[in-house]
Image: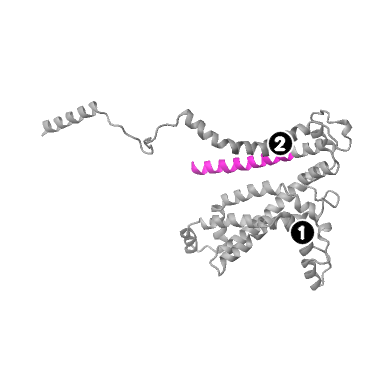
Amino acid sequence: MSGLIRKKKGQLMSQVAQAPQKFTLPGMHRRTTPAPTIEGRAGRTWWHLPALVFMITLTQIPFLLAVWFSLHSWNLLVPSEGFPFVGLANYITAFVSDPNFWPVMWNTVQLVVGSMILALIAGTILALLLNRPIWGRGVLRALATVPFLVTPSVMALIWKNLFLSPSSGMIDWLFHLVGLPNVAWFSTFPLQSIMFIVAWEWTPFVMLVILAGLQSIPDEVMEAAKVDGANAFMTFWRITFPLLRKAYEISLLFGTIFIFQTFAEIYITTSGGPGVSTNTLPYYTYRTAFTSFQIGQASALGVIGVILAIFAARGMLRLMTERTVSERN
């Protein structure tokens, strides 16, 4: 018996030695197609070229021109002076000499932070309500997205004339019914009024992202929380909110970038006033360029705004990436 086993083993070893078999480790996939050649890669690259040229034309070239203008003094009111090179003088003026720069930066921070907080709270409430099995849920979801689809200029006109007007606005009409005095919202609470309008516009976006996150949570998780006796608040705080972290991060990332660029709402409602109380960095850049006609100074402000937006976006993306990697590990 042992001789037979030894014989079979010898035959098997000789077969392996004569014709070694290919093998794959777990997780490895055998290549079924030949590796792409250099010519094939170059051919695929040509298809990307139009999109690359389009992106460079619309983003990088204007930014480089803005950087070039920011290093020169160019006043449209005095064309005879030309645009002499001044180096970093426009940036030094913005950070040191301009008395309005830091108040404008503070207004920008307040608008972005305040609008995002309001939009996150309102969007979460709407998402939780519209995630329930209620009658007409599809119609209500469609109606809730309308403020996000309306252009900012039209939305600003609606709020300025229909809701917040001290003489004919709906809110002041309700105040009059209960015996309260009329309020000139855009002169008494200018920045807060714009903050509310911007939050109103971005609430539907937050709602859609949070709603998508809610629908991705398994029903078994929520049912287990109910079985354990958790109330609605504890279920949201201990289970729903942690599972929606990525949805909140996406809302915060896109909302911060786009709210930072707010312009039409300020231009139509307050024109940056009273004083500079509602001037944000984009609007102040516009005023410097097309009211004071200081193109070099306005270009420096624009470059500062772009750099701040890039750093904010990269910071948030890095935090999101590091947290995702730590969770996987």
Q: Position of residue 187 (x, y in %)?
A: 84, 57
Mark number, residue 174: none
**Residue 238 is at least partly visible in this image:** no
Which numbered tag is attached to residue 157?
Answer: 1
Given residues 145 and 25, the one toward you in this image is 145
Identity, as a three-letter code, of the amino acid under mark 2: Phe
Q: Nearer the viewer, residue 136 or 329?
A: 136
Is residue 20 visible in the rendered image? The answer is yes
Q: Is 209 positioned to the left or the right of 153 in the image?
A: left
- The residue at 70%/55% (across/down) is 151
Residue 138: % across, % down: 56, 64
Say left or right for 200 vs 223.
Answer: right
Q: Which residues are magenta?
A: 304-329
Q: Quadrant of residue 207?
A: bottom right
Residue 91 position in % (x across, y down): 79, 34
Say if 325 sits above or below 233 in the image.
above
The answer to whether 323 is drawn above or below residue 14 in the figure is below
